[in-house]
Image (cartoon, helix red, strand yellow):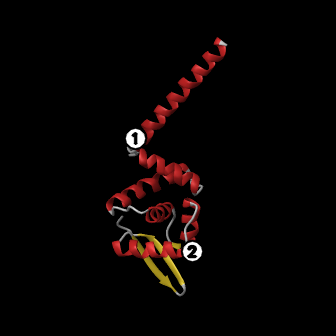
Amino acid sequence: MSEDLSRIEGLLKEVIKRLERLEALLTALGFQEAEEVRLAGELSLGLSLPVVKALNAALRTVRVASKYKLVDEVSKAIVKVLASSEGVLTLSELTRRVRRLRGRASRRTVAKRVRILSEKGVVKVERKGTRVYVKLAGDV
């Protein structure tokens, strides 16, 4: 019994060391807020992103959300998806990814929020024929 407890204690000490190293690394990379790390986990799991890409997207998402004071969950989800994507997404693909992240999202709701975000300067929208392309604005 005491042997098992010693083994568990050793494992816990190792886990604590690893967590401290991870925390130091995240702080060195500029991840000082728990919100950024929580978002990175959500993006990594929800959109199957590599951790580093999810961390970068989380930083960008937090920056945009605070700059533009985004409060509704659909707008935040749109920014999360766009921050984690490379380049431009069609409105349909954006809706699919928002749905995957949130569990539900209609194209109509996403389109409405995209219009609002475009008016605020958060996203850029471009129409080509029948397709609508959306990306985060370059200055955010």
Instruction: Give the vertical position of 20 relative to 112 (above or below).
Output: above
Residue picked out by circle 2: 92
Residue situated in front as seen by the camera: 122 or 105:
105
Query: As shown in the figure, which amino acid type bears the numbered disc 1?
Result: Thr
Question: What is the count of numbered marks?
Answer: 2
Q: Residue at x 34, y 66 (%)?
A: 139
Q: Which mark is residue 27?
A: 1
Circle on res. 76: none
The C terminus lies in quadrant: bottom left
**Residue ID at (64%, 12%):** 2
Give the Cα separation between the discs numbered 1 and 2: 36 Å
Disc nearest the viewer among 1 and 2: 2
Residue 69 horizontal/vertical position (percent): 33, 61
Q: What residue occupies the far top of the structure in this picture? A: 2
Give the residue displayed 51% in from the left and 80% down from the top.
132
Q: Is residue 22 above or below residue 16?
A: below
Disc 1, disc 2: CB below 8 Å? no
Mark 2 Cα-neighbour bin, 10 Å: few <14, some 14–19, many ≥20:
some
SS assignment at label 2: helix
The quarter of the picture where residue 130 lies is bottom right
**Residue 55 appears at what percent x and percent y?**
47, 51
Q: Secondary structure at mark 1?
A: helix
Q: Which amino acid is tagged 2?
A: Ser
Residue 74 placement (x, y as % from top left)? 47, 65
Which of the marked residues, 1 or 2, is nearer the chain's N terminus? 1
Position of the N terminus, as image quadrant, is top right
The image quadrant that residue 47 belongs to is bottom right
Q: Residue at x 38, y 61 (%)?
A: 71
Pointer 1: residues within 10 angstroms few (<14), some, or many (20+)? few
